[in-house]
Structure formats: C-alpha cells, structure tokens
Amino acid sequence: MLLPSFYDFCCRVKTISGHKALEAIPGLLAGMNARRPLIVTDKGVAAVGLIGIVKKALGSKLKIGAIYDNVPVDSDYKVVDDAAKVYKKKGCDSIISIGGGSVIDTAKGINIVASLGSDTLLDYQGFGAVNRKLNPHVVIPTTAGTGSEMTLVAVIADPDRKIKMLFVSYFILPDIAVLDPRMTKTLPGFLTAATAMDAMTHACEAYFCLEKNPMSDGHAYRAIKLISDNLLKVVKNPGDMKGRLALANASALAGVAFSNSMVGVVHNLGHTIGALCHVPHGNAMSILLPYGMEYNLHKSGDIIGEILLPLGGAEIYASTPKKKRAEKVVELIRKMNQDLHDATGGRHPRFLKEITDRNGKQIVPHSMLPTIADCMMLDGARMSNPEEVLPADAILILEHAWEGTPLNRKKINKGGKKVKY
Amino acid sequence: MNINKYPEIVPGRKFLKEFYVGIMLWVVGRALQVAAKVDKEVKAELAKLPNNFTLRMMVAPEKAFPLFFYAKLLPSFVTDIGLLPYGIQMFLHKDKEGNIKYIGADPKGKKADLSVIFTSIEAAWLVLSFQESTATAYMHGRFVVEGDLPHSLTFVRALDIVEVFLLPKIISGLAVKRYPKWSEMSLMRKFWKRIVIYIRAFTIG
Amino acid sequence: MHIPDHYEFLNHSKIISGKCALETIPAELGGYDAQKPLVIALKSVVERGLKKKFIKTFSNSMVVLGGIYDEVREYAGISLAQDAAILFKARGCDSIIALGCGPAVDLAKAVNVLVSEKIDNLSAHYEGAAIKGPLKPLIVVTAGRSNGREAANALVVDNRELVSDFLCPDVFIIDPRMTPGSCGESVAESGATAMAQAFAVLTDRGINPMTAAVAHPAMSYLAEYLAKGVKRPKNRQASVALANASVMASAAYSNSRPGMANLLAGELAEATGISAGRFERIILPSVIAAMLKKKAWIEDDLYLAAAGIDGYAATPAGERTQRGLEVSLNIVGGLKKVLPVSLSEMKVQKHFLEKAAKAAAAKSGKRFTEAECASVLAQAWDAAGKVK
C-alpha cells in the first residue's frame, strides 16, 4: 500500500450503526453528561414521520428540551442564531440533528453559538475562532450520501453579504453519528440513487485525489464496494433494510474518506453547477464522476484502475489487463448511471442536458457552460485534483458531460510530472 | 522530587531559514507587483480580487517575532525584507484603481483581507525552496488561509504563473501541477518577461 | 461485505505522519489553545540523542516546553506519574506530549487523568468511578518500542487497567526523524504486537467496515515492511510504515474483540513479567496453524490487506481464507529468529500454560474453549507451527 510522504487523518466521530442504533442514544448522551437535547430538523423530515420514530426510540429515558424544525433548504446564519436562542431558552445541553446536509450543517452552527456563548454565529468566523470542546452533538443522517456527519466543515450562508461562510475546526465534528436504516427507509428511489452516487463520488475522488492516504483508502475502498453491491438492489426494492444499512455505512465511510483526502474536479464543477443552476448535488456528482475520472486518467490511471476491484469485483479486475482497468472503471460507472436511470424510470439523469425541473424545463442550458467554467476557478476543490484545471479544460469536460459523449482524451492538455502522492 | 532537574526549555530560532524565507517573501511580493503590471494573464487573474484589498503572507506565529523598539532605527531595506522586527511577513495592496503594490512588512495600521499563513518556519522553507509544490503544500497543510477561500485560489493561480516566469523549468516544474506548453505560453514571452520582472523587481518595482 | 446488526466504533486520534510532522505540533497545540506542554519521554529515546532533534523542531514557535520528564523506562508506575504531575503543576503546563511509545504513553495518560481531574492517585477510578470530562490535550510522538496500547482507550499503570474513551490520545505524530528503531529486536516486538492486533481484528467474526478500514492499511504495511524493518531498523521508510501500522492496529483493536493470541500472550506476560509482544510472536503462528487446520471461514479483508489488490484478485474466492492465513503466517515468519520462536526457549514454567489457557478461555466470551487454547500453547511450546 502506498505510503505518502506526508499525510494527516482525523475522524473522531463515534459511529453507532445498526437496525436498533437509535435506541443507544440516551445511554451515550448520559455518558457525556447530557440530559436535555435540542432536536434540530426540517419540515420535510418531520412530515414523513421520522421524528416520531426517533422519539419512540429515545423513550422516556431522555427529556427532549425542544424541537426546532424550521431549518430551510439553504440555511443561513439567522436560522442558526434563532435556534441557538431556543436552545438557551429551553435550557438544553446537547443537540440531536436529524436530516440531510443542510440540517447537519445548521446544527453544527447552532452548537458553536450555543456552546461558546455569543449571540450570533458571525462572531466565530475565521481561522481558530472555534477553539474549545463544544457541547455533545448527535447526528442522525436521513439521506445516505452527504457524509456531513463525518466532516469538520460547516457551510452556512450569509444572505446579507451574499457569501457562504466556511467554519472549519476539529471541534465542529459531531460527537456521535447514528446510522439507522429506519431513517432512510422512506427515501424515494431516485433520491436514494442520487445520494448514494454522491457518496460514491466522495469515495472515488478520495481514492485518486492528491491528499489520498492509507486510512482514507481503507475507508473509500469499503464505501465503493458497499455501494456497488447494494445500490441497485435498494433502488429496486426500497424495503431492503440490510441494503439500506449498507448504504448508510457506505455514506459514512465515504464521508470519512473524503473529509481527510479532499475531492477534485468532479466536486469542483459540481459545486459550481449547483451554485449557478441549482442542480441537486447528487445528480451533478453522478453525471460528472466518469468525466472527472477520464480527465485524470493520464495522471493517475494506475490508482483509478485499483477502483475496479471494489467496483466490479475480483473476476472483472483479474480478467482486465492492467492498462485497461481505469477505462473499465469509467465504463462501469457509466453503466451504473444507466442502470439507475432505467430503474428509476428515467428520474436519475445521465447527462447534464437531462436534468430538468418539475415543469420539465432544462436546468442547465448549454449557454451557461462558459459561465460555469469561469466560476469554477473559485472553488477550493480544484487544488486537490491531480491534473490542473483551467477554464479551457472545464469547458471540455462540461461540453461532453452535457451531450453525454465520452470525453475526447486527445484534447486534454497534458504536461508536467506524474503525480507524487 | 527535585523539579529543577527538568528545566523549562525555550526553543531557539533558525536564523538562516528565517533569512531565506524573509528574502523569498520579498521577492514574491515584488515579483507579483511587477508581473501584474507587465503580464496580461497575471493582471487578468489578479483583477478578480476586489479593489482596496490587502493581502498578507506570513509565517506563524506572528508573536514569535516581537516588535523590537529599535525597529525604526534599522535601514528600511532591512525592515522591508521582513526580517526580525515585524516577524516574517509581507503585504500586498490592491488600490482603488486596481494597481498591485508591495507595501512592506510592517503590520502596523494594515488590516489584511486575506492572509496566507505558513504554519511554521519549516513549512515556509519547504514551500519557498520548492521542495513541495503549491498544491501539495496546501494538501499537506503547510499553509492555511484566513479570509475568503476563492481569493486565495486566485492568488495561488497568479503565483503559479509568476513562478513559471521567474524560474527555470527544472525548478518551476516542481512547483506547478502542469507546466504550460509552448502553445499556452511562448518561449519568447516567457524569457522576455523573466528578464523584465527580475530587473524591475530589484529596481523600480 | 459483512455489516453486523449493531456496532460502535470510535477512532479518536488524529494521525499526522511523514516529513516535518513534528513541526505541526505547535499548530496542533494552538488549536487547543495550549502552548506549554510537559514532555514525558522514554529514557531510551533521550539516550539515543533524539531529545535535541525534538527540541529543535519547536524553533520559531511560541511553544515553551514546561520540562522534559525523562525517567520512564520499561515500567509505568503511579509514583512516576505523581512526580510528573507535580512538575506539570509547578510549571503551569496546559498539555502533555509523550515522546516515545509504550510506557511513556501509559504514563502520559495517567498524568493527564491526575492533572485534569485534580486527584492524587487513580484508585477511585480503578474502583469504577468514571472519568468525567475531556482531559488535557495529549500528543504522542511515536518512537521506540510499542506495546499496542497507544491509540487505545485504556491505560495500564502498575499492571492495573483503566478504560475510558477520554483516554485516547488526541494526536499521533509519526516523524521519520523519530521512528527509526535502535535494534531489530524492538522493531520485531512492536511488529509482532501490531500483527497480532491487526490479525485479531481482521479475523474476528464481528468485524465491521470501520474497523476493517483501519486495520487494512495496518496489515498491508506489516506485509510490506515488517521483514525489511527488522533487517534494517534504521530504514526511515520502513520505520514510518511500521509506526503507522502500530498506531492503526492499536486503534482498530481497541474497537474489536481480542483474539486468541492476544489473550494468551496477555496472560503469559502477566504471569512472567515478560512483554506481551514476545509471546505474541511465539503464539501467533500456532494460532494461525490451528485456524488453518480447522478451516474456519473468515472475511476476505484479511487476504485483501495482506496480499494487496492484485494478489487478492488473482485468487479464486474459495481459496482466499486459506491463502490469507498462509500469508499472515509468512508475515510473522518474516521476523525470523530475531525473537525466540518457542515457549520452551523462553523458559516459561509449564504450569503457567495451563492457567493461561483457562484464563484466556474465560475472557474470550465463549469464542474459544480451554482445550483449543491449551493445544495452541502446546504447539507453541516446541514451535510446531513453524514457518513454511
């Protein structure tokens, strides 16, 4: 296994996984001297009755301080401040967040404000502002994909200044992540597909991007394997609880991997498309993943080829010659997208031009591509991509991803040395 | 137990590396200032930064280098390099008209919008002696960024171009991810800019 | 891939490994708002002249070392911890750095409990009182011989164990300037410990993807570097890889159940006072031989980790368990005769074996019977489980 010249790895989230994982929460909170949690969630989660399941599982052992379910899709600091007020008013001493990426990020923000004592999140911007242990925070993810339960970043918008504030600190990491298949059971097929492909992208990019390290590899490998083994099964049979548990695990594993090894051009373009055209993150990821891999083939083809083992299985890996493995990986990912497209009745898009909103209108018009390519330069993920990405390169990728044709690899700008990890 | 057997230890300093890093920061600052004037690509890149913008590059921790009372007594070219009195740092300022200017190493009265902070003198040494490329150094946490991340990416991109201008391919090939082809940057342009930037950086700025 | 119906996993420590890793300590301490650490160092490490290098890495930082307490030898005792705690308080320190593995880390954890909980000894905690809150930041700089407890949530002082999640060190620093070993023997011993732990994790029936993900690189590094590291203990790359393996194996192991080799070696070590690593070296081949004989089914992870991706894929699915065990046997075989290979060579008294088998079977939670343990020990007595 590769030994990097330098790496760091940290994931201090305690993971509880299982079909009855929720029931363990009261005991764990008591172990951290917490008795009165604030539940943070959004209206969507509350509407499908997940709060009820959690409440039932918590039982009478734990007194819930309050339930805050006003988290919007694009959360901002005002929501955080508002919820922190509720937290203080009700005398809570810990947080349980139930939801997807937005809810978890908001809860991380609430924990900063509530634990460190100020009234507003704006006081804690900047490097090193969060510098001591926060109150206990339990995360119950309801979408198996974002991996936010394992990351030390909270992205919270400031609508007044029109920026996204980034909070990065090891203290922001939640204390406990609870992976319980009951929480993802109601997720419809196309969302399951999108979120799982998001996790797949995390894992694949973690495996070949510059900050890759032995620990992140171990996690990424298992995430890829679990997703490729289980995703199609779960989409076809939503009640498959074992498969659901596997996907929840995969998402957490991928979260650990990518938060320690960072992500590359796929996320770079995906974030930008998401910000400019409001494309759902998971869809952008699943579409761009094969292109991102193709783009880096000449720099880290050997590494990408290794992904074939967890993705395709030992037989395919052994029967494919070494030089063709990376291309086979790309092919399999494309096939996976196609299969999901078929299994969800076309609701899982394969190309950028296929993404539509509720009225059937194209979300990413072809005319937007140059704008996306320019704005891509401002996203941090481009730093950790093995190959340099400049606007001209981005256009190349985007054009192909829009049309749905494989990347013309002859046109990629090559140069410089092989990647040294 | 005799606690005096285990004395308190105040670690020393690495003067040579301080000196080298200080000079390199000065060169980087001046070179960026000149490159922004003479090269279109760098100019276009730095135009993405807002006007009236101050950028700081420094080696952490700042407080390890106290402001000595005799700082003002030293000749300005010593303090400008950023040695000793102000800690190892440099400031670049983009004024209202969009001109980039190196404004010395004295942090007094300057508020940085974006700080690029090397986590230790050794980290700065690794990066500025080109043992690690900018991207690798960022991956390895050799420097952290305080301020808006997009701005720091702009800055790093500008720095990459300037490195290609200033250094022979053998060295700058280590520092950037992809060395530009002739079609992207002609030899003529590269060598001409190399001479101009060097001369102007050390003279008129 | 197997996912158990319920599992819990925690790997608290951050790992920083590689070039200039030591120079990150001031920044790490800064993240905890600390700048005056007490250093608890192994005497052997200091005697090898690493102290000077260590101090030098703090140049140009705000960190002041509150003192280097270098009285730790082979044994971590409470009196040493109390002395260090006095030093800690007298100098007004706010964090702890353990320089060296094994007893230095145990002691640092003990000191950390003493100073954070403001108590004089650990007796209340031995009797079951829980450690209340987060302790002071603890950074471990790996060097010297590991005892496999570094990344665990436990400490052993005066042969008594204390377990709490708060005891996990916060940061591990693995720096090529510190890791090279003094002799093949100590490398072999740490390697045997790590090997036994990684093997226990990867062959455990309750294995979950998280522990597997952490034990996988540990096993891979052992497979690749153990023989090389023992032959050339000063080799930097091998020593860094093995130090990584030690830390990872110990982190995974603390989330898993002990295997037979660990239990038996632990019992024998307690009875004889010889370190467990030496016994693990002897017992592990016999355990593997017994598993080979029994044709027990184990997860693919073991073979994948030990043989690497290409070797794994080239082997038919049915043979992977068998081949995994064989490769593991080879890895232990890479230690050659650096350490004794049979219990008789160690001159262990025979009546210890019986007791050890009994105690290990009792501690295993009905996973192994006393007869199984005894037969393994009998094999290990005259090294029947020889390397192929």
Image: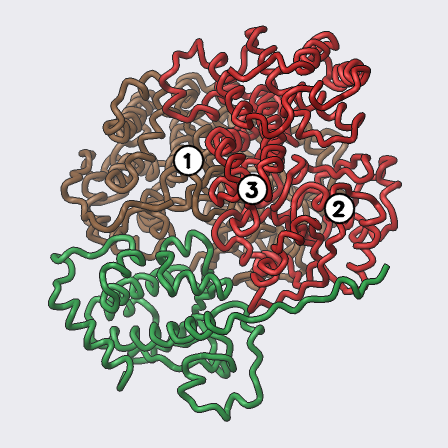
Q: Residue at x 53, y 48 (%)?
A: C16
Lower position in the chain sequence, tag 3 or tag 1: 3
User: On the rendered structure, is A19 left or right of B199?
Assistant: right
Give the residue pinned by disc 1.
A203
Q: Is residue A122 above or below residue C385?
A: below
Query: Which-is-in-front pick, marks 3 and 2?
Result: 2
Determine if residue A346 is in view. no
Colour for chain B in the figure: green
Relative image position of residue C121 (x, y in whole percent) = 87, 46
- Residue C107's tag is 2
Local SS, label 3: strand
Query: Which-is-in-front pick, marks 1 and 2?
Result: 2
Instruction: Choose top left, top right, bottom left or bottom right for residue A217.
Output: top left
Q: Counting other residues with Cα less than 10 Å from the Cα at mark 1, is it few (<14), some (14-19), or many (20 or more)?
A: many
Q: Return the residue nearer the eye: A295 or A419.
A: A419
Give the CA distance from mark 3 to mark 2: 25 Å
Relative image position of residue A88 (x, y in whole percent) = 70, 53
Relative image position of residue A273 (x, y in whole percent) = 31, 47
Give the residue pinned by disc 3.
A11
The residue type indicated by label 2 comes to: Leu
Q: Return the residue nearer the eye: C48 or C156.
A: C48
Q: Are marks 1 and 2 on the same chain?
A: no
Q: Residue at x 40, y 18 (%)?
A: A236
